[in-house]
Image: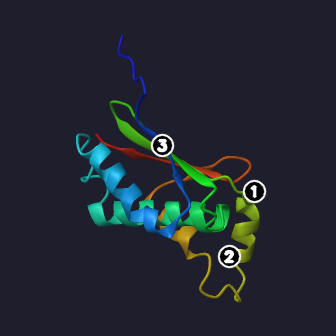
Amino acid sequence: METNCSNVILNAKFPSVISNKDHIIDIIINKLKEYPFTNKIDYNEFILLLDETLTNAMEHGNHWDPSKLVNVEIMHTEDSISITIEDEGPGFDINTYYKKRMSPNLGLRGRGIQIIKHFCKPLWNITGNKINFTINIK
């Protein structure tokens, strides 16, 4: 009987400082080097996906408050890599976001979630301060 157990690749907390984003992305990329999945998602698209999820957590969740942390957890199974990013903010209601998204007065804000949804199928917790997405590696 084959099991598909999850193993933790990374579980770390980082201050919500804009200059940390590239460093966090580098850490994630280095941790994932032994799990090739670029045939499922382009490398640059993956970087953009990470950048958007981290920006949303740090900017909208933690309001760039360096005393508030962003937790990054990466798990892998034989078939996939799961990334969870959680901020310390109050969260948001995804349904309200989609209603606002239909408004013609949206302007330049709100594109991050659309970019994220373009590259994966994100899931938010009920509070809206934790996002998880999975990338198949087989």
Q: CA distance from mark 2 to mark 1?
A: 20 Å
By what rule are the colours in the image chosen?
rainbow
Quadrant of the rendered image containing residue 22: bottom left
Q: Is residue 117 visible?
A: no
Q: Is residue 86 above or below residue 109?
A: above
Give the residue at x 43% y 27%. Answer: 6
Numbered circle sitting on residue 90? 1
Q: Is residue 135 above or below residue 90?
A: above
Q: Is residue 12 left or right of residue 131?
A: left
Amino acid found under the numbered disc labelled 2: Arg
Q: Is residue 75 above or below residue 107?
A: above
For label 2, the residue is 101
For label 3, the residue is 12
Q: CA distance from mark 3 to mark 2?
A: 32 Å
Quarter that holds the C terminus: top left
What secondary structure is found at the residue carrying circle 3? strand
Quadrant of the rendered image containing residue 93: bottom right
What secondary structure is found at the residue carrying circle 2? helix
